[in-house]
């Protein structure tokens, strides 16, 4: 299983694009036991809703994929950390877990094959930071949802200090077609570096918002054509609140990890948020800054203070342009650099991304 997943080229769909096979191999190889499997279903990034659609639509696929991942990594217990505001997904998953037990698909002796695996659902309580995997471990363990130091890696010391493989919902369900069609056939979908299909969460100024599945490598323009691109499109925020803007004249950017990186933006978990020219951009940037200020866990100073300073500066420049805004824009860059370089976790490191890309790429406040 690990060989197939590795050769398929599957990388994580939760934002960091880490190779899944390598994570599984590293967990399986650890001599300490027990091992744990954690499914990250916290999905609290603004504009992200693909995992909800998977879990509401086919909870059995996730149960099967978690069982496969548990088997491959040597885990007998899986935690499913579910966003608190997903009551419908919760009902479906609880029902599916009960059914799976009744049919011998979960429990002490799965399908009489001598492998034991069970899944426990833990509900989040509304904190975006608890989607960060080490904060998520703390939350499951009953501590404050604050990220831990990245070293040692979770595959060595993760949940309860034991080797842990943590994966996103979409990553896990992709394992099922890999095992049924084989690694080579899966790797033939998409591009060489971004293999397989990808779910994109399209929202904002489009006629048909929703989750769209396309092979990696389709262009942003092709995706927006499916969703009903407005004639007066101004910009698209790729990758969500921590992502970057592209202009309406840049829609040929390929939707791959490498293609978006080369274009100076990012794909992250697949958020595609469209803005037409009636949307007040400074207000949108302020809302993003408010989000990061609200969601910063406060553990480290660059993020705790920086997200507040960023929001204050954006409040001041709301409605200002040109020379009036120049001092605050210089301050935003300075604060942004400090957050990027000195924050403990991805939240603080990326809290400036959208603001900076709106200034550099869209000429916000000019
Ligand atoms: C602030 C923050 C929030 C995150 N939220 C989520 C989330 O809701 N779901 C998710 O799968 N990953 C989230 N991540 C990424 C996880 O830390 C981790 O990289 C991911 O779950 C690994 O799974 P994957 O390799 O399958 O992508 C978040 C990261 C950060 C920094
Ligand atoms: S970067 Fe922000 S969210 Fe992350 S640990 Fe520091 S204060 Fe908490």
Image (spheres, rainbow, N blue to C red):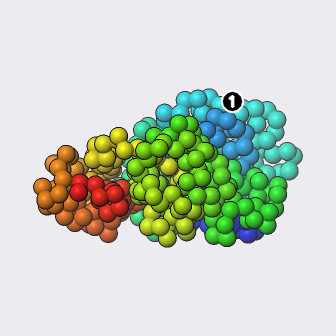
Residue visible at 49% across and 35% down? Answer: 84
Q: Give the percent coordinates (x, y) of residue 131.
A: 47, 49
**Ligand 1 neighbours mark 1 (CB distance < 8 Å):** no
Whether residue 340 is visible here, answered yes or no, is yes
Q: Which of 155 and 231 lies nearest the eye of the viewer?
A: 231
Determine whether, in the image, residue 350 is placed left or right of residue 113: left
Q: Which of 351 and 203 lies nearest the eye of the viewer?
A: 203
The C terminus lies in quadrant: bottom left
Q: Quadrant of residue 277?
A: top left
Task: Give the total number of marks visible in the rendering.
Answer: 1
Determine whether, in the image, residue 52 is placed left or right of residue 351: right
Residue visible at 74% across and 46% down? Answer: 64
Q: Give the percent coordinates (x, y) of residue 207.
A: 53, 36
Residue visible at 81% across and 39% down? Answer: 104
Q: Give the percent coordinates (x, y) of residue 81.
A: 55, 44
Q: Which of 222 and 129 lies nearest the eye of the viewer?
A: 222
- Identify the secondary structure beneath mark 1: helix
Residue positioned most to the right: 112
| In the rendered image, the vertical position of residue 297 relative to residue 360, given as above or below | above
- The residue at which mark 1 appears reads as 95
Count residues near mark 1 (Cα–Cα under 10 Å), then give few for <14, some for 14-19, many for 20+: few
Whether residue 183 is visible here, answered yes or no, is no
Q: Give the percent coordinates (x, y) of residue 154.
A: 53, 63
| In the rendered image, the vertical position of residue 335 relative to residue 199, given as above or below | below
The N terminus lies in quadrant: bottom right
Determine whether, in the image, residue 143 is placed left or right of residue 68: left
Residue visible at 63% across and 34% down? Answer: 56
């Amino acid at each position: 299983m690990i060989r197939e997943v590795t050769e398929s080229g599957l990388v994580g769909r939760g934002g960091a694009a880490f190779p899944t096979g390598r994570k599984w191999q590293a967990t399986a190889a650890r001599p300490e036991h027990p091992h744990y499997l954690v499914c990250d279903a916290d999905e609290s990034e603004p504009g992200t809703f693909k995992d909800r659609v998977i879990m509401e639509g086919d909870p059995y696929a996730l149960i099967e994929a978690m069982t496969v991942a548990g088997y491959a990594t040597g885990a007998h217990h899986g935690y499913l950390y579910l966003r608190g505001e997903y009551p419908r997904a919760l009902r479906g998953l609880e029902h599916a877990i009960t059914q799976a037990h009744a049919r011998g698909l979960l429990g002490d002796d799965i399908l009489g094959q001598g492998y034991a695996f069970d899944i426990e659902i833990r509900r989040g309580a509304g904190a975006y930071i608890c989607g960060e995997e080490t904060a998520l471990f703390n939350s499951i363990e009953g501590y404050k949802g604050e990220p831990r130091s990245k070293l040692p890696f979770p595959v060595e010391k993760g949940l309860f200090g034991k080797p842990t493989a943590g994966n996103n919902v979409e990553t896990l369900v992709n394992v099922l077609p890999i095992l049924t069609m084989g690694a080579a056939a899966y790797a033939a979908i998409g591009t060489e570096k971004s293999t397989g299909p990808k779910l994109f969460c399209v929202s904002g100024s489009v006629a048909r918002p929703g989750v769209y599945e396309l092979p990696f490598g389709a262009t942003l323009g092709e995706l927006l054509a499916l969703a009903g691109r407005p004639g007066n499109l101004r910009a698209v925020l790729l990758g969500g609140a921590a992502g970057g803007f592209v202009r309406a004249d840049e829609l040929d950017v390929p939707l791959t990890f490498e293609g978006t990186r080369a274009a100076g933006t990012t794909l992250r978990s697949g958020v595609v948020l469209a803005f037409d020219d009636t949307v007040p951009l400074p207000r949108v940037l302020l809302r993003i800054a408010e989000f990061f200020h609200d969601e910063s866990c406060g553990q480290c100073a660059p993020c705790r203070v920086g997200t507040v300073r960023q929001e204050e500066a954006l409040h001041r420049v709301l409605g200002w342009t040109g020379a009036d805004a120049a001092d605050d824009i210089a301050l935003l860059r300075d604060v942004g650099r400090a957050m990027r370089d000195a924050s403990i976790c991805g939240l603080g490191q990326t809290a400036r991304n959208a603001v900076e890309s709106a200034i550099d790429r869209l000429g916000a406040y000019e």
